[in-house]
């Protein structure tokens, strides 16, 4: 495999994704917010609230699939089939939990949120179904990454936000029914899942095979190591979002909070895009070409740090001008600008060392990988309350 060409392909795909999402966000989002209002935009954002824990609930399967794809003890098909069984078991368990919580009338969004009971119930059910399909999509994305199709994942994700915003924009001309807007993200998530299934079936040799309990146990043990590694980091962002909506109980304010995350994550994604494809490469080649892999890791780190500095400087000088296109009130605009700056600085600092995190994951040095990520929950909580 030509590592340079693989990296170039993924960087171009990642940058293309970020530029597409950024352009669509800046062009369409101000028009959408003006047309449907900040509150309705906040409701649409809330449908994706629970999907944030999908990386936690999948028990580390996504990383395990990529790592074990280079394992000689078990074939790729056995790894993926075992992962499918584990994934479906997880879905069954959380489905039972969701039904029980609803049966007990536990209000997951709080009693004070400014939504009707019908809207709240529809939002919860839709959010749960999106979580299910996100779990399935995570499985598909890891299969594609293990087979060096990470650029396909990036292209597909690049289309998600534009298609969602375009759908909302077009719907705004025909209906003001809140329930229609709530269901729209679910439909797009299902379409994305179907695309992954078709692509995997037609462009890879992956297929479901017969596996034993030993195979499933082997994959599960590996995935649980990744779960332990990312447990706190995986849960911190969804928890902060959930706490925020419970604290403010206002979909409009949640919309501003969500916007700040969206913009900051675009910057974060640009930096991380340099490191993302390296996990599959490190997993397969680090034992044979350790010195070469180490040099590549440091080169990516230096480039990531440079991009980080440029992004901070760019936002400092151009941030207010760019955000003015969102046509928010002056007070909301000030809050949004400060939130985004704090998030860019904090999330970007972690993104810079992402390549070393993936290096240690690929080399199965999970303790070192854990230490790198340990700063995330601490700084996140501090900045959240700030």
Image (cartoon, rainbow, N blue to C red):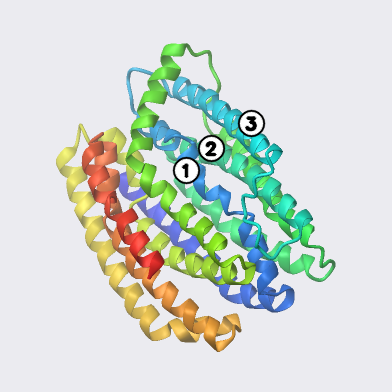
Neighbor class of circle 1 (other Cα within 10 Å; few <14, some 14-19, many 20+) is many
Can residue 137 be seen in the rendering of this structure?
A: yes
Q: Nearer the viewer, mark 1 or mark 2?
A: 1
Q: Are marks 1 and 3 in contact (CB under 8 Å)?
A: no
Lower sequence index among marks 1 and 2? 1
Q: CA distance from mark 1 to mark 3?
A: 19 Å
In the foreground, 106 or 381: 106
Q: Which residue is mark 2?
A: 140
Q: CA distance from mark 1 to mark 2?
A: 13 Å
Residue for point 72% across, 64% down:
168
Secondary structure of the residue carrying numbered label 1? helix
Looking at the rendering, in which quadrant would you find the N terminus? top left
Q: Which residue is mark 3?
A: 96
Looking at the rendering, in which quadrant would you find the C terminus? bottom left
Where does the image place residue 39, in percent across and percent down from the top left? 67, 70
Lower sequence index among marks 1 and 3? 1
Where does the image place residue 364, in percent across and percent down from the top left? 26, 34
In the foreground, 24 or 9: 24
């Amino acid at each position: 495999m030509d590592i340079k060409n693989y990296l170039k392909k993924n960087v171009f795909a990642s940058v293309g994704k970020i530029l597409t999402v950024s352009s669509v966000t800046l062009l369409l989002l101000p028009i959408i917010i003006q047309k449907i209002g900040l509150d309705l935009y906040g409701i649409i954002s809330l449908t994706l609230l629970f999907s944030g824990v999908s990386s936690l609930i999948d028990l580390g399967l996504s990383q395990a699939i990529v790592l074990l794809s280079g394992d000689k003890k078990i074939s790729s098909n056995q790894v993926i089939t075992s992962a499918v069984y584990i994934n479906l078991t997880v879905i069954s368990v959380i489905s039972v939990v969701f039904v029980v919580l609803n049966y007990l009338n536990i209000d997951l969004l709080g009693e004070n949120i400014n939504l009707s009971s019908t809207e709240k119930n529809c939002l919860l059910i839709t959010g749960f179904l999106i979580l299910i399909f996100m779990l399935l999509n995570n499985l598909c994305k890891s299969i594609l990454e293990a087979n060096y199709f990470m650029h396909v994942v990036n292209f597909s994700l690049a289309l998600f936000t534009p298609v969602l915003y375009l759908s909302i924009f077009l719907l705004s001309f025909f209906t003001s029914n809140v329930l229609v807007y709530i269901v729209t993200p679910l439909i797009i998530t299902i379409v994305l899942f179907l695309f992954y299934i078709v692509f995997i079936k037609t462009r890879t040799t992956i297929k479901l095979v017969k596996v034993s309990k030993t195979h499933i146990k082997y994959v599960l043990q590996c995935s649980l190591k990744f779960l332990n590694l990312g447990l706190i980091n995986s849960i911190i962002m969804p928890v902060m979002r959930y706490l925020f909506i419970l604290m403010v109980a206002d979909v409009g304010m949640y919309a501003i909070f969500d916007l700040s995350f969206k913009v900051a994550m675009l910057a974060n994604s640009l930096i991380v895009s340099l490191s993302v494809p390296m996990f599959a490469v490190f997993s397969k080649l680090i034992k044979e070409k350790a010195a070469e892999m180490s040099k590549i890791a440091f080169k990516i780190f230096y480039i990531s740090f440079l991009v980080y500095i440029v992004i901070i400087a760019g936002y400092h000088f151009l941030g207010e001008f760019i955000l003015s296109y969102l046509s928010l009130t002056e007070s909301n605009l000030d809050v949004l600008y400060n939130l985004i700056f704090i998030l860019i600085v904090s999330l970007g600092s972690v993104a810079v060392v992402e390549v070393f995190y993936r290096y240690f994951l690929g080399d199965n040095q999970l303790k070192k990988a854990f230490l790198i990520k340990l700063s995330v929950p601490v700084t996140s909580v501090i900045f959240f309350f700030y």
